[in-house]
Image (cartoon, helix red, strand yellow):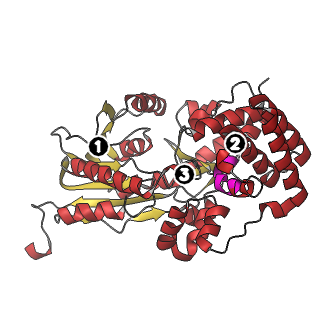
């Protein structure tokens, strides 16, 4: 039987070396309770990494000299001692010391034992944050690099702490009903024992305890697709038109293409990743869409000559709106990455626009909340294209305001030179 704490440790080591948790975590062979414990330790340790290091530094003079695996062990142990109450502290110490002996030497296990027992002696005081500077306090308390604390203070002002705190909230599993309305889907799932509720923006449905959801008849027969509520709102910016030809430029995994297929005549779904399109095609078959055609195409290169009435550019981005789901992002993305990504996004937007019919609509969205990747890209585009306008003011979703992922979206309208305006009457 696999040990859940050893699984947590090996997962954390992979994440430290650049993997994402969802790719590195492999609970095969674990009982459900052990799987849940390992997953909780992994996500909690990553979410609180800077805070845990702050605590360790009080007891280890040269933290940078610690072997990485021993540092991870201490983080794991401190996370369990401070945030979890299912295991007594002395049991956590014993388990952690045993692991240290297996992966390192007697000296390392002695250090681990000494640090953790000192933490027990100090109790809650060991975890208190004593920092005068407010930026530093927020950075330590919520484990955010100071660079991002300053950024969000400029953007959010007195909402900054609420936003940082919200990134620790569990991200809900949200469904979009397909071929049925929300009430019917909720009724069907509740009959199978799932607790569900409808949320805004409708028709999003949250499932509170989703274990076993993908074995249900509703899933197998294509009556829902997993998609965050903010993501579901993107396609609603388009004007529906059953005659319209549409393109989704960065389509995989496909949720927005599926929505577009329900309000437009045909959708060409392009993506640079053949592997991601294979998974998308599996869902197309499961959900029963007949008017979506997929193709591997890199949106950074010029597109074919075909013109479209509706185009979606759900651009690749830094993902800073997804920190609840991918907490490792906040340590890996810096401001320079934002600027670099914005250049790519601007190119994608330009290439997509070249395929837009006069009078057509182009929706631009990202799962990021930075100004540079959103307002900045749109401002640059609109400055270069005075023949375009925003259909209405863009929308940004925040986890602390809306309970959704962070998402930003706006709809651009290309003027039809042959259409009458008020001066032609």
Decide if residue 4 is in sight here.
Answer: yes
Q: Secondary structure of the magenta portion, mostly?
A: helix
Counting from the top left corner in percent of width and height, residue 196 is at 66, 49
User: Between residues 352 and 328, which one lies in front from this camera angle?
Assistant: 328
Q: Provide the secondary structure element on which disc 1 rests.
A: strand
Decide if residue 241 is in sight here.
Answer: no
Name the residue tied to disc 1.
247
The image quarter containing residue 167 is bottom right
The image quarter containing residue 276 is top left
The image quarter containing residue 419 is bottom left
Is residue 281 covered in magenta? no
Name the residue tied to disc 3.
331
Question: Mark 3 or 1 closer to N-term?
Answer: 1
Task: Tell me if residue 296 comes above or below residue 142 in the rendering.
Answer: above
Q: In the visual, does 303 lie left or right of 188? A: left
Magenta highlight range = 43-53
């Amino acid at each position: 039987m696999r040990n859940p704490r050893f699984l947590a440790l090996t997962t954390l080591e992979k994440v430290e070396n650049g993997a994402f948790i969802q790719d590195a975590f492999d609970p095969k062979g674990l009982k459900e309770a052990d799987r849940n414990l390992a997953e909780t330790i992994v996500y909690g340790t990553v979410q609180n990494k800077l805070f845990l290091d702050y605590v360790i530094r009080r007891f280890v003079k040269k933290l940078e000299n610690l072997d990485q695996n021993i540092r991870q062990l201490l983080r794991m142990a401190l996370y369990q001692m401070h945030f979890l109450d299912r295991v007594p502290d002395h049991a956590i110490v014993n388990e952690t010391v045993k692991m240290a002996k297996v992966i390192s030497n007697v000296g390392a296990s002695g250090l681990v034992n000494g640090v953790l027992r000192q933490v027990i002696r100090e109790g809650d005081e060991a975890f208190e944050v004593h920092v005068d500077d407010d930026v530093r306090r927020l950075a330590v308390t919520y484990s955010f690099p100071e660079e991002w604390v300053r950024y969000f203070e400029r953007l959010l002002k007195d909402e900054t702490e609420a936003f940082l705190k919200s990134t620790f909230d569990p991200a809900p599993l949200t469904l979009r009903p397909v071929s049925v309305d929300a009430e019917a889907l909720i009724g069907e799932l509740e009959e199978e024992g799932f607790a569900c509720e409808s949320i805004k923006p409708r028709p999003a449905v949250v499932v509170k305890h989703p274990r076993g959801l993908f074995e249900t008849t509703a899933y197998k027969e294509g009556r829902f697709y997993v998609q965050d509520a903010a993501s579901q709102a993107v396609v609603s910016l388009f004007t529906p038109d059953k005659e319209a030809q549409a393109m989704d430029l960065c389509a995989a995994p496909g949720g927005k293409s599926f929505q577009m297929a329900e309000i437009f005549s045909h959708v060409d779904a392009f993506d640079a990743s053949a592997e991601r399109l294979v998974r998308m095609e599996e869902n197309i078959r499961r959900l029963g869409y007949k008017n979506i055609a997929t193709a591997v195409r890199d949106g950074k290169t010029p597109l074919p000559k075909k013109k479209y009435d509706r185009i979606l550019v759900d651009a690749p981005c830094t993902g800073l709106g997804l920190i609840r789901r991918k907490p490792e992002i906040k340590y890996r993305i810096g401001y320079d990455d934002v600027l670099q990504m914005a250049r790519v996004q601007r190119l994608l937007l330009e290439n997509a626009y070249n395929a837009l019919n006069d009078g057509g609509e182009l929706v631009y969205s990202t799962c990021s909340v930075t100004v540079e990747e959103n307002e900045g890209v749109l401002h640059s585009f609109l400055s270069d294209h005075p023949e375009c306008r925003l259909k209405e003011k863009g929308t940004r979703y925040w986890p602390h305001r809306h309970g959704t992922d962070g998402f930003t979206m706006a709809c651009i309208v290309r003027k039809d030179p042959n259409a009458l305006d008020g001066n032609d009457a």
